[in-house]
Image (tube, rainbow, N blue to C red):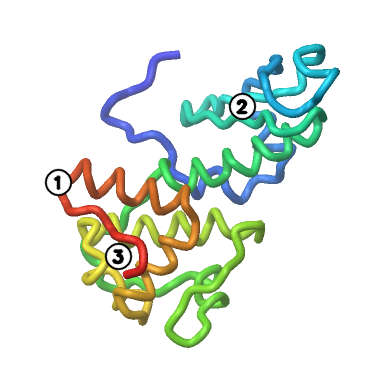
Amino acid sequence: MATDPAVPPPGWRAFLHLSDEELLAQCEVDRFRASGPGGQKRNKTDSAVRLRHRPTGLESVAVESRSQHENRARALKRLRVTIALEAREPLSGAALEGYQPSEAIAGRMRGQRIEIATKNPAYPEVVAEVFDVIEGHGWRLSDAAPAFGISTAALGRFIEGDPVVFRAANERRAALGLGLLRPGR
């Protein structure tokens, strides 16, 4: 299927609201054998799962469990976070200047912090919105933090709270030639 390079691929908003079944229907599912837990059953069943999201081309893998069902659920959760981190919808111009945090973020504000557990189903949406605002500010946390009404340090702590998110933020900053975020900001 050919894509028009002038048309950007759909962003995270097109996918993160979907149910697990709807998102899974958009994926190619590969089952395979992988090394890992299992003792005597190791390498005897195809319990590892790889999901390839056709609309975005993004992938996720889970191999931890001997249960294919558990691995599919883990891979789906990882795919949601990957979409949140990679399928950008950055704000610019008037949208950036007039930005108001969505209910997903506003409902997680605790004083000067964004608080949400990584296991919360709304977590990928919150991360995606935070990344969009930071992207709109050229990945300068000091410029993006006031949009959320928090300090630069609080925004840094939110990003640092999940190693996957922290790594993705530093990869994006490095690609832009910016210094890496340090733990413990």
Q: Work out how far the residue at label 3 is from the one at label 1, CA to CA, in angstroms.
A: 25 Å
- Circles 1, 2 touching at the beta carbon (< 8 Å): no
* Residue 17 in the image: above or below residue 76: below
Report the residue that reaches farthest toward the right. Answer: 40
> What residue sits 32% from the left and 75% below the top?
153
Q: Quadrant of residue 37?
A: top right
Using residue 39 as the reference point, say whether residue 170 is left or right of it: left
Depth check, mark 3 against mark 2: the one in front is 2
Q: Which residue is mark 3?
A: 95
Q: Position of residue 169 (x, y in %)?
A: 34, 51
Nearer-the-camera pick, 3 or 31: 31
Q: Work out how far the residue at label 1 is from the one at label 2, CA to CA, in angstroms.
A: 32 Å
> What residue sits 37% from the left and 56% below the top?
131
Element marked by disc 2 = strand
Nearer-the-camera pick, 17 or 36: 36
Depth check, mark 3 against mark 1: the one in front is 1
Three-letter code for the amino acid on which mark 1 is drawn: Gly
Q: Which residue is mark 2?
A: 51
Nearer-the-camera pick, 66 or 127: 66
Q: Pick whichever of labels 3 and 2 is earlier in the sequence.
A: 2
* Residue 117 in the image: above or below residue 169: below
> What residue sits 32% from the left and 53% below the top?
90
Using residue 20 as the reference point, say whether residue 165 is left or right of it: left
